[in-house]
Amino acid sequence: MSIFDKSAFKFSHQHRSFRTSAISNGQIVQFKLSDIGEGITEVTVKEWYVKEGDSVSQFDSICEVQSDKASVTITSRYDGIIRKLHYNLDEIAYVGKPLVDIETDALKDVASEEDVVETPAVSHEEHTHQEIKGHKTLATPAVRRLAMENNIKLSEVVGTGKDNRILKEDILNYLAKQTGAILPPSPKPEIIPPLPKSKTVPAAPKDRGIKIPIPISKPIVFAGKDKTEAVIGFHKAMVKTMTAALKIPHFGYCDEIDLTQLVQLREELKPLAQVRGVKLSFMPFFIKAASLGLLHYPILNASVDENCQNITYKASHNIGVAMDTEQGLIVPNVKNVQVCSVFEIASELNRLLTLGSAGQLGTNDLTGGTFTLSNIGTIGGTYAKPVILPPEVAIGALGKIQVLPRFNGNGEVFKAQIMNVSWSADHRIIDGATMARFSNLWKSYLENPASMLLDLK
Amino acid sequence: MVIPSSLKNCFQLFYVLKISAAGFKYTANRGLILQSVSSDVFQNLAVEDWIHDNMNLENRQVLFLWRNSPTVVIGRHQNPWQECNLKIMRKKNIKLARRRSGGGTVYHDLGNINFTFFTSKKKYERMENLKLVVRALKGLRPQLHVCATDRYDLLLDGNFKISGTAAKLGKTVAYHHCTLLCSADKINLSSVLKSPYKGIKSNATPSMPALVKNLFEEDPTLTCEMVMDAVAAEYARCHQIDHHITLINPADETVFPGINNKTKELQTWEWIYGKTPKFSISTCFNMVYEQSLLEAEVDIHVKHGRIEVCSIVLPEQWLPPAMCNELEKNLIGSKFCPSETTALASTLLRICPQSYELHSKWSLLCENVMTLM
């Protein structure tokens, strides 16, 4: 409840407002739209950077207006709280008329009309002076307030600005010297574009961990704030999918694969593929070997209905490849791997990767998958615990290839190229033995690539 | 002591560009002519930002010359869906950028020269700048009939637009930039600057389409270098400074501290698309499914580039209402963007009833909704 004099609103110019609320005891100042130049008298308000109730500092951006192909950023002349916006978006604002009402703190010297800071059409720069002990010290009202809050005498601060003007940095440096601590910079109300993937809080000042040797009267102010965002768009869809996925009882099965021979084979085949315009990675081999394995264990390429009452054995091996893009995790798939050569798979992968990084994959590429491989090893890691992507029933995560010592058949140590694989499968319809046998078959094709030749279709 | 002029100019640039926000004045230097070595629109726009934010232009003027690889540049308060053909642009790898100045949409390629005139706010005078460009062109080729209009365009032969203007005014600095069509690809220009999107209702600044012509169509002996040099010479003469063009690299943090952050910000989706003023699309499209023609009605409201309201009306029972609702619900909050929609729709399909018919109908619907983006 306030004893606000309602009639005060009718007079738009300066007056003292008496309130019983906890808000500061300030005066409402009308900030008028100043001259834009070129004889312009009216502009269109295109964007507000503040809303009623926001606090602003001097020099903060208030709004963006446009006039005849010129976009102008209007900045605040005062520190205070925005009490009223005089225009809505797309309305016409007039030069010389009030733009916003700002409630400033009741200071002895409020920024005078001469203190024009956003229109230096005024050739002399006047700042409100403060006469202390006969010294005239130059400082803006914002800086003076900072000094006052910290009980600092401006005459004792060394100004590094133009004409020895005292800047905000000078006050902070002065304080730091006093307390022996480095004060974090005060929070700047910048517009920070929201990051789609990471949900990190804005970085805390570097010196958070530094111990303060001399106790000071004021506590250190930590400028970082928690940031809450709604889960929307693609992430919301992922939440739904993953929630459904975890209803599937997963079991895991892991193994290590000796890729020494495959590494050599790929080295030989890489230039051949290059000549045909295709980049050959390890994935086409992993994918083809998986398809050969699925021919023997088709239950891994199946799908169950919602109540697990029917199993559908899918004829096509549409093997999905997890891809990390700007959106997040997407899984395009290579269609009909069972009738593709390793080269054709490599070619198709190239196409999907190019489209993926350009954000141009179509729905056809992203749907219809029956089995998935995730090559998390390109980023790092050894063993993983992948989550099955419904409506599939199995998934494999491939770790990074490491050079490790292993024993050969003669008991000698040799350098082996080892990669780990982590399978997850739907335990309602797949048992450990099936998974293990499939994995062994897949492993045998990759450890001895020549054996793939026997079974290639 | 006689300092070699190239070295002297190095010192000038060094002092001029190392100005702190506190306002170090190097009064002897009245002006500077800079030319970018980069054709990346984001880097070049970042240079404008940097100069606007960091240089003290109280007693100094700067001319900045730059050209870009094929890009469509929209004004600060414009709607890209209303202004250009995003589909063709994606196919042809033509970039989209949003500048900080107002005005309309333009097409840039290496056959287009951009001039930015930086001054203090009180010395902001667009007509003078345009007259300077006209003088330079006439000096180069007296038979060229070029003039400035009161809309700050430059016309060739009274009919064809060869230059458009935009400006940005900040706290203490103002800049006016304009294009100049020398040998741009007019076929690309007209195909990308035509929006295929129907049913858009928006308060964004619209562009005025105009007949355009390249300067080189009038005089094939001209080159971009000649034109840039002529304007630089005229600028130098007007402001009584050295006719010396300093080449700058917009990626150099030692000369432009903090510029790479500005470049990054200009490339974010939030800036390019997210700054589009609120708008709505109300339209219908036809789909062909198994030899029958179906009509769908769509009403989508977009704010900050994200879908705020989404309504898709389909023929009754063509798709289970629950599925259609699921799509509408999940699109809310999503970016108005085909790749985000594709990723979202494909992911949702995983938890829908698995039937070939439903999947193909869903895919068909989503493909069509994406054509609106």
Image: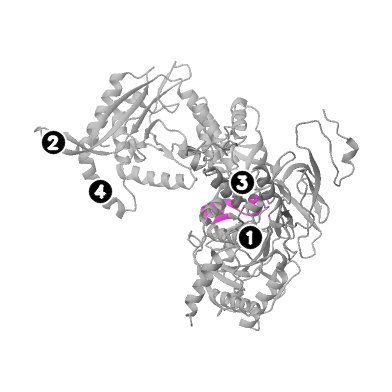
Task: Name the disc covering residue A164, or none.
Answer: 1
Task: Name the disc covering residue A190, or none.
Answer: 3
Vertical relation: A72 (above or below) B365: below
Q: CA distance from mark 3 to mark 2?
A: 59 Å
Q: Nearer the viewer, residue A138 or A332?
A: A138
In the rendered structure, which disc, 2 or 4, sits on the residue that comes first in sequence?
Answer: 4
What is the crowding at mark 1: few (fewer than 14 residues within 10 Å), some, or many (at least 20)? few
Q: Does residue A150 appear anywhere in the picture?
A: yes
As helix, strand or loop, the secondary structure at mark 2 comes to: strand
Depth check, mark 4 against mark 1: the one in front is: 1
Vertical relation: A314 (above or below) A265: above
Residue bounds of the magenta highlight: B77-96
- The answer to whether marks 3 and 2 sit on the same chain is yes
Q: Chain of mark 4?
A: A
Q: Chain of mark 1?
A: A
In the rendered structure, which disc, 4 or 3, sits on the residue that comes first in sequence?
Answer: 3
Query: Left or right: where does residue A4 sit relative to residue A309?
Result: right
What is the crowding at mark 4: few (fewer than 14 residues within 10 Å), some, or many (at least 20)? few
Residue at the image point whose x is 67% and y is 52% from the top: B78
Depth check, mark 2 against mark 4: the one in front is: 2
What is the crowding at mark 3: few (fewer than 14 residues within 10 Å), some, or many (at least 20)? few
Residue at numbered disc 4: A269
Q: CA distance from mark 1 to mark 3?
A: 28 Å
Residue at numbered disc 2: A413
- For the residue marked with disc 1, what is the amino acid? Asn
Q: Residue furthest front?
A: A133
- For the residue marked with disc 4, what is the amino acid? Leu
